[in-house]
Image: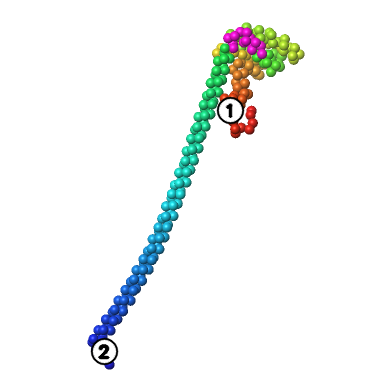
Amino acid sequence: MALTDADVQKQIKHMMAFIEQEASEKVEEIDAKAEEEFNIEKGRLVQTQRVKIMEYYEKKEKQIEQHKKIQMSNLMNQARLKVLKARDDMITDLLNEARVRLAEIAKDPAQYSKLLEGLVLQGFYQLLEPKVTVRCRQQDVEMVQAAVDKSIPIYKEAVKSNIIVRIDQERFLPSGICGGVEVYNDNGKIKVSNTLESRLELMAQQMMPEIRENLFGANPNRKFTD
């Protein structure tokens, strides 16, 4: 039985409706898939950026912490250096004051004469030479000669040996020093420095640990003393 035009039109409409429905469903499916892929990609990108941001700020935080540690270390070192300098300045002032007091000793003839006797005799004992030369300040020549004259018999008795002593009348010790003597062997190659300054310096070196402890207290990090 032949289809009428109305039947044909009806079937065409039905087919078109089916095609449109299928196309609409396909579009929705594509849209849904595209939305899903977009959300997945967006989530991946967001997560990637979040990780990058976290890594960036973690790196910054470590840099800041490291910078703070360096600054703190620098400040502590600067403070330590200032303390050390202040202590060194205090010790220098103490030694300068001791030098001033030494200069006062030379102004007391009785005290200074006794001191010169000890310094001269000590020079003899340290050299143990048959011939020695004593050098002193020009203003001390007479007192040193007296000290030499008094020390020679003591030395001879102690070491059972003779000694010839010459006081250098051509080259004197600087008049600006506090006093004392230098004693040389015969050829002048060996010297015993017994000036008041050299004795003070030697004593300061030997007593420096004790001086520091008395001034600043014991160092808890130091197990032994010199």
Q: Is residue 134 above or below residue 34?
A: above
Residue 173 visible in the snapshot? no
Residue type at mark 1 is Gly
Quarter of the view holding residue 137: top right
Residue 79 in the image, given as x and y percentages of width and height: 50, 32
Q: Which mark is drawn over residue 217?
A: 1
Asked which secondary structure carries label 2, the reply is loop
Check disc 1 and report its element: helix, strand or loop: loop
Task: Tell whether label 2 touches label 1 (CB within 8 Å).
Answer: no
Q: Quadrant of the C terminus?
A: top right
Q: Give the residue at x 59% y 31%.
A: 219
What segment is highlighted magenta in the picture?
105-118
Magenta highlight on residue 117: yes
In the rendered structure, which amino acid carries the disc numbered 2?
Answer: Leu
In the visual, does 123 lie left or right of 4? right
Image position, residue 57 (x, y; %): 43, 49
Determine which residue is flagged by label 2: 3
Residue 12 is left or right of residue 182, and the answer is: left
Residue 59 percent coordinates (x, y)? 46, 48
- Residue in the image at 46% along x and 41% along y: 67
x, y (%) of residue 208? 60, 25
> Observer-nearest residue: 117 or 91?
91
Q: In the rendered structure, which disc, 1 or 2, sits on the residue that comes first in sequence? A: 2
Q: How busy is the neighbourhood of tag 1: few (under 14 within 10 Å), some, or many (20 plus)?
A: few
Which residue is at a point 70% across and 10% down the rendered structure image? 152
Number of residue marks:
2
